Image (tube, grey):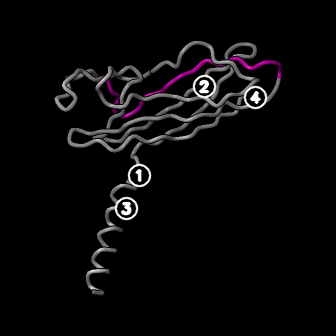
């Protein structure tokens, strides 16, 4: 009885470790004042080999696209859409049976924002993404960010 209980606990612990795998992607964020009350916010993903993350622009039925959710701040207005800057690859993925767009190594996402008045505030939010290699995908992950606008 004790051996079965121990074996069950060990297997359960191993399963938790497998599902709690950390994403290999590292995120950083910066803000640069560009004009008056406007800032260019850059959120950068560093993706080690052999991993890659997907573009924001992935068709239906494919992998989870990278997406951003910005925390509402009455002092900050988003200007335009979030842009991608990096070496995008487009390949036909047999797992999804479609062409997919992804980035390896490094990709930056830029968002222009306007701050109301001459105040110090921040832009915060969360990025949702999926990381894969040629053999497997990890479950979708999210990472919070906050960058000072001063």
Judging by the rendered image, the residue that carries numbered circle 3 is 16
Mark on residue 51? Answer: none
Looking at the rendered structure, the secondary structure element under dot 1 is loop
Q: CA distance from mark 2 to mark 4?
A: 12 Å
Label 2 or label 3, whichever lies nearer to me, is 3
Nearest to N terminus: mark 2 or mark 3: 3
Q: CA distance from mark 3 to mark 1?
A: 12 Å
Residue 21: image quadrant is: bottom left
Q: CA distance from mark 2 to mark 3?
A: 36 Å
Judging by the rendered image, the residue that carries numbered circle 1 is 22
Judging by the rendered image, the residue that carries numbered circle 2 is 41
Nearest to N terminus: mark 3 or mark 1: 3
| Residue 126 vertical position relative to residue 97 in the rendered view, above or below | below
Looking at the rendered structure, the secondary structure element under dot 2 is strand
Judging by the rendered image, the residue that carries numbered circle 4 is 150
Q: CA distance from mark 1 to mark 4?
A: 32 Å
Viewer-proximal residue, 30 or 10?
10
Quadrant that contains the C terminus: top right
The magenta region covers 101-118
């Amino acid at each position: 009885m004790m051996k079965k209980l121990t074996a069950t606990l060990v297997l359960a612990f191993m399963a938790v470790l497998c599902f709690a795998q950390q994403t290999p992607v590292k995120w950083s964020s910066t803000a640069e004042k560009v004009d008056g009350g406007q800032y260019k916010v850059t959120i950068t993903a560093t993706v080690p080999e052999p991993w890659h993350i997907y573009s924001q622009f992935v068709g239906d039925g494919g992998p989870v696209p990278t997406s951003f959710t910005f925390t509402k701040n009455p002092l900050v207005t988003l200007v335009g859409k979030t842009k991608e800057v990096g070496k995008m690859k487009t390949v036909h993925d047999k797992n999804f049976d479609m062409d997919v767009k992804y980035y390896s190594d490094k990709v930056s996402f830029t968002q222009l924002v306007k701050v109301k008045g001459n105040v110090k505030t921040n832009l915060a939010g969360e990025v949702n993404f999926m990381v894969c290699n040629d053999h497997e995908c990890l479950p979708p992950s999210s990472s919070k960010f906050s960058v000072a606008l001063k």
